Amino acid sequence: MMHDAANLLCTTVQQQRFPLVIAADHSTAASTIAGIRPAHPQSRLGVIWNDSHADNHAPFTTPRGTCMGTTFQRRGGLWANEAILLLFRLLSDPRVCCWEICEINPYRDELTTIAELSLGIFQAGLEVLGERFSSTSSSHAS
């Protein structure tokens, strides 16, 4: 199913149409990223991850042993130590940003430290945002 979704998204982008992916789970991101990459093979992909979890699990490190929370590992193509190199290539772009992360998988973090993957992790509450934006003349948040 993920392969079909990625192919459909790739075709949609190649036809210069705007894809809208509606899903009930962040695991859909693996298909979305997989579809965008071949549609723009020479482009550098930027990712904004808006979730409370880094989704850097492998099935053997998840509480239930399922694919939940494995988006980045799955997108890398492997659920083993080899994923380190693939993830580094996927996420080495400094335009990758994880927002609102409150949990990083401690099992995978021993093998693939988020900092080594060049992910920018920003944890911000309303107070922090207020402090940082207090000197601006106008702001917008969605």
Image (spheres, grey):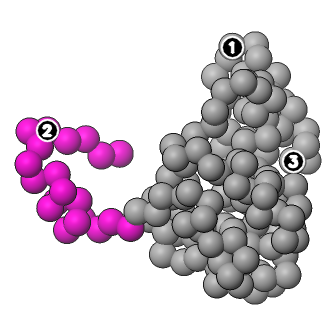
Q: Residues within 10 Å of mark 2 (few under 14, many from 20)?
A: few
First-in-chain label (2 vs 1): 1
**Residue 117, x across and y down, in percent:** 62, 60
Q: Amino acid at mark 1?
A: Gln
**Residue 112, x across and y down, in percent:** 69, 71
Tell me what residue is drawn at x 72 percent, y 24 percent.
Answer: 42
First-in-chain label (1 vs 3): 3
Q: Which residue is mark 1?
A: 16
Gap in angstroms between the C-alphas marked 2 and 3: 41 Å
Q: Tell me if I can see residue 73 in this picture.
A: no
In the picture, the disc for residue 32 is: none
Q: Tell me if I can see residue 102 in this picture.
A: yes
Gap in angstroms between the C-alphas marked 2 and 1: 33 Å
Q: Residues within 10 Å of mark 1 (few under 14, many from 20)?
A: few
First-in-chain label (2 vs 3): 3
Tell me what residue is drawn at x 73 percent, y 32 percent.
Answer: 36
Vertical arrangement, residue 27 with respect to residue 10, above or below: below
> Which quarter of the rendering shows the C terminus?
top left
Predominant secondary structure, magenta span = loop
Q: Nearer the viewer, residue 63 or 115?
A: 115
**Element carrying mark 2:** loop
Q: Which residue is mark 2?
A: 138
Q: Amino acid at mark 3?
A: Met
Q: Nearer the viewer, residue 22 or 93?
A: 93
Vertical arrangement, residue 106 with respect to residue 41, above or below: below
Q: Amino acid at mark 2?
A: Ser
Q: Is residue 108 left or right of residue 6?
A: left
The answer to whether mark 1 and mark 3 are in CB contact below 8 A is no
Q: Residues within 10 Å of mark 3 (few under 14, many from 20)?
A: some
In the picture, the disc for residue 2 is: 3
Task: Look at the image and give the residue range highlighted in magenta.
Answer: 123-142
The answer to whether mark 2 and mark 1 are in CB contact below 8 A is no
